[in-house]
Amino acid sequence: MASQLSLLILMLFLFNLASIHVTGDQIMLEDGYMVSTVFDGHKLNINPYAVQLRSSDLVVLDSSHSVFYTLPFPISQDSVMVNRLSGEGKNGYTDGEPGLARFNKPKSFAVDLRGNVYVADQLNHVVRKISNSGVTSTIVGNYSRTGRQDGPGETATFSGDFEVLFVPQICALLISDHGNQLLRQIDLKPEDCAFGPQSVLGAVKFWVLGLALSCLLGIVIGIATRPYVIPHEGFRPLHLSKTWKHCLINVASLAQMSCYDVKNAFPSSSPYILLKETLKAEPVSSFTHVPD
């Protein structure tokens, strides 16, 4: 009897084992990617919870210590210069200078075009702003209560769980208010969405370089095609100096433009305008095509 019961149990076990289908997910490992450590927070007692690029540096959030740092970008492997942007290093709620401001373990932040940092200070129920100089201020929210009320300043209320995203196309912050299951918008000031000085400087350098290369290319093409045209008064190598001077004048004037004139500088430095002005300086009638 005992042997029959043991046999029955064995058969049931084998039946259940046969009915189990082992399935595995297909893994496709793509080659060509390498992981390397560029910053070790253990050495400086910094826990990089989140990071964002801000023009020529990185903004690093140490959520556990409620401190924001900046690192130069790209990061040097030899040495990393770490600067404290804002945060005293203690949890709380205080606005003011970099060494006096206090946050309450924030986990989300965004950076606008001028380098201002917007902090979703969830446990304090507010959205705060850190300027380029590190001065912290509160823009919306109410520290004393949570809620879902829209409006300006302290009228607006948030839950204790939300994230922030900067959207330059509409000059606003989008708030993903998880606790209230809402997507909310904070309209920013126009100056917050304008390009910062470093961004403008980079754009000017790009256009100056492009204009200079266009001038050089035009000179090279002019010299290469010179044998196929005959000037009325013989070959004069300095005849192209007008075009070269015109290019230098355009480069110098573009480089000296202020940051506020950059938008006007782009159309005036277009290839069409440059070609039209060059043709004015070099009349076509001064050359005669070589007859076949």
Image: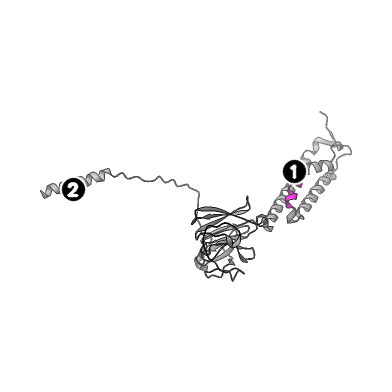
Q: Is residue 13 left or right of residue 29?
A: left
Q: From the viewer's side, name the closer residue of 65 and 225.
A: 65
Residue 181, given in percent of the width and then of the height, sits at 49, 53
Query: In the rendered structure, are the residues bearing label 2 and label 1 in contact, judged by CB atoms less than 8 Å apart?
Result: no
Find numbered disc 2 in the image and state the secondary structure of the residue it sits on: helix
Looking at the picture, how far across and down is residue 152, in whole percent? Answer: 61, 59
The answer to if 42 sits in the magenta stretch is: no
231 displayed left or right of 75: right
Q: Residues within 10 Å of mark 1 (few under 14, many from 20)?
A: few
- Depth check, front residue: 22 or 169: 169
Q: Which kind of residue does numbered mark 2 sit on?
A: Ile
* Mark 1, residue position: 271
Question: Is 265 contained in the magenta span?
Answer: yes
Name the image quarter holding residue 101: bottom right
Residue 206, placed above or below residue 104: above
Over which residues does the magenta segment extend? 262-272
Instruction: Measuring from the top left, give residue 104's x and y in whole percent.
Output: 52, 66
Q: Residues within 10 Å of mark 2 (few under 14, many from 20)?
A: few
Q: Quadrant of the C terminus?
A: top right
